Image (spheres, rainbow, N blue to C red):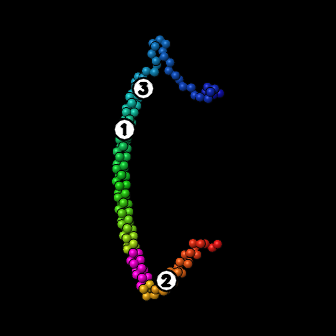
Amino acid sequence: MSSDPPSGKASFPTTKPSETSGESTSTRTGPQQGSADGLGEVMGQFSRDVGSLKDTFTRLTSQLGDVGTKSVRNVSQTVASQIGNATSGIVDTGSDLASSAKEHAKTFASELEGMARRNPLGTIAGALVVGVIIGMMSRGRS
């Protein structure tokens, strides 16, 4: 048979206070005290290392933030410059188109005026035809 308790868990010895002196039997002496001091030193070193890692991580995060900020600033300046160049190009093109349309309108008006002076009856007939077409379109097909 097994020496394990029926609950399936292993039993560990527990420290009980001494009945004669009132002190616990868990006081450490000799090698136990040395290993506790060594453990304390290791834990102290571990705590210092964690603090050092925390400081290093903080500095790294700060540097990455600075680099990211500079990159975003450079990209935004580049984009703003490109948008400015594109906008000025569009404005120039629009201005050229407007002046070209103005010149075409002046030319067309002067051609109509010249045609009306050369053939006044044809101009009146053309105006009558355009008026009839507009009248038919405004009535609808009913």
Circle 2: residue type: Ile
Between marks 3 and 1, how big is the CA–CA gap? Answer: 29 Å
The residue shown at (35%, 58%) is 77
Task: Tell me residue 53's x, y (percent).
Answer: 37, 41
Residues marked 3 and 1 touching at CB (< 8 Å) = no
Using the rendered view, name the quadrant where residue 2 is placed.
top right
Circle 1: residue type: Gly
Q: Residues within 10 Å of mark 1 (few under 14, many from 20)?
A: few
- Within the magenta stretch, is there residue 110? yes
Element under disc 1: helix
Can you identify the residue that label 3 sits on? 32
Q: Nearer the viewer, mark 3 or mark 1?
A: 1
Task: Tell me residue 139's x, y (percent).
Answer: 59, 72
Using the rendered view, name the quadrant where residue 114 is placed.
bottom left
Task: Tell me residue 70's x, y (percent).
Answer: 34, 53
Task: Looking at the image, tell me whether mark 1 or mark 2 is earlier in sequence order.
Answer: 1
Can you identify the residue that label 1 sits on? 51
Circle 3: residue type: Gln
Between marks 1 and 2, how big is the CA–CA gap? Answer: 98 Å
Side of 75 where 135 appears, left or right: right
Between marks 3 and 2, how big is the CA–CA gap? Answer: 124 Å
Can you identify the residue that label 2 sits on? 124
Task: Looking at the image, tell me whether mark 3 or mark 1 is earlier in sequence order.
Answer: 3
Q: Magenta stretch?
A: 100-114
User: Which SS does the magenta portion mostly show?
Assistant: helix
Q: Which of marks 3 and 2 is in front?
A: 2
Element under disc 3: helix
The residue shown at (37%, 33%) is 44
Task: Tell me residue 141's x, y (percent).
Answer: 63, 73
- Quadrant location of the C terminus in the rendered image: bottom right
Q: Residue reaching furthest top?
A: 20
